[in-house]
Image: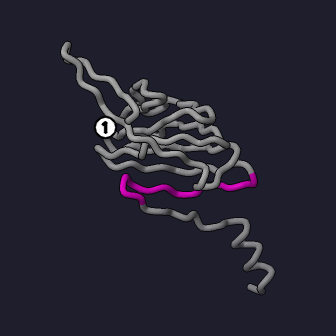
Amino acid sequence: MDNKQIIRSVSENPQPVTLEKDWGSYTVLHEEKDNLTILVTLTEGSRMKYHSHAGRRELWVVASGNGKVIMNEEERFVRTGDVVEIPRQVRHTVIAASELKLIEVQIGDTRAADKTVYDLRQDYYDDGSTGYSVG
């Protein structure tokens, strides 16, 4: 195979890049100027930091597993097949009840620097219920 064939082969079939995180890992599946598609894998019981993005929105498709998504302190349970749309500037996280795999599509500013992290607190009430607040 000559150099042109090797370059064409690599550009047509780039190897995915996987990055390890304290909550699991993510693999870059596709990248263009204003969008990024990744496979996110969270280990059972883990969660991402509670955060928001000023310059992008995200779409999450639950590929497998279950857990809960918290957006602006409101909790929603998710399972395989669910779709979650996260608008710009909305605080969000996901908590894995089992191993959880998400296909995440980022639209807009996909730089890692476009992130604000918040302290998410779980509040416990006298009636036994719980809620969330930002500390």
Q: Nearer the viewer, residue 128 or 24?
A: 128
Residue 15 spot, x, y in % from top left: 60, 67
x 72%, y 72%: residue: 9
x 43%, y 24%: residue: 74
Q: Nearer the viewer, residue 74 or 31?
A: 74
Q: Please tell me whether residue 29 belongs to the stretch shown in magenta.
A: yes
Q: Circle 1 is placed at which residue position?
A: 97
Quarter of the figure with the C terminus:
top left
Residue 16 figure quarter? bottom right
Residue sitting farthest toward the right:
4
x 47%, y 30%: residue: 71
100 shown above or below 68: below
28 on left or right of 24: right
Residue 13 spot, x, y in % from top left: 67, 66
Q: Please tell me whether residue 59 belongs to the stretch shown in magenta.
A: no
67 on left or right of 19: left
123 on left or right of 29: left
Range covered by the magenta-colored residues: 21-33
Residue 80 figure quarter? top left
Q: Nearer the viewer, residue 110 or 51?
A: 51
x 73%, y 79%: residue: 6
Residue 103 spot, x, y in % from top left: 54, 44
Residue sitting farthest toward the front:
135
Residue 118 spot, x, y in % from top left: 44, 41
43 shown above or below 118: below
